[in-house]
Image: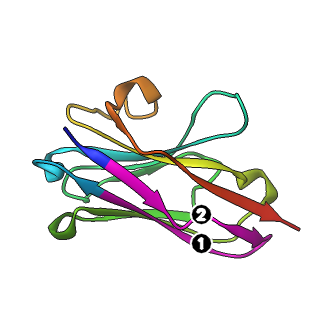
Amino acid sequence: QIQLAESGGRLVHTGGSLRLSCAASGPDFWRHSVAWFRQVGGKEHEFVASISTGGGSTYYSDSVQGRFAISRDNANNMVFLQMDSLRHEDTAVYYCTASRGVTIATMRAPSSFEYWGQGTQVTVSS
């Protein structure tokens, strides 16, 4: 059983930066792929970024490519999402997720991820 806890969300102005953190606990976290999803209101979860077990492969949605960077520190069971050049449309609750057995074909689907954190609110205001 993996438990995830996000932190770092807050109010930031357009063009600003934030770094979200995800602290993981549980066995063999390093065996799990990790992704960040975001959700606005009651809409569906939107894929943001994912990272492979060893951190060597990263993937991004078109909307954040070039502005966000995902990374992980397996020694300390941590995952990060560096967000730069923030836009109003980045406003959402951001969730850290993890699972084993995720492939390139399935990593953008929320249903592919077994473990979810409670979410952290990011608000981008002009």
Residue lying furthest bottom in this view?
Answer: 16
Which amino acid is tagged 2?
Answer: Gly
Q: Magenta segment, principal secondary structure?
A: strand
Stretch of the chain drawn in magenta: 4-23
Residue 109 marker: none
The C terminus, quarter of image: bottom right
Residue 9 marker: 2
Is residue 71 found inside the magenta-colored segment of the image? Answer: no
Residue at horizontal 20 percent and vertical 35 percent from the top: 100
Q: Which residue is mark 1?
A: 18
**Image position of 121 with respect to 41: above or below:** below
37, 55: nearer the viewer: 37
Q: Are marks 2 and 1 in contact (CB under 8 Å)?
A: yes
**Image position of 113 with respect to 84: above or below:** above
Q: Residues within 10 Å of mark 1 (few under 14, many from 20)?
A: some
Classify mark 2: helix, strand or loop: loop
In the image: residue 38, left or right of residue 16: left
Classify mark 1: helix, strand or loop: strand
Residue at horizontal 14 percent and vertical 46 percent from the top: 31
Residue lying furthest right in this view?
Answer: 126
In the image: residue 125, left or right of residue 53: right
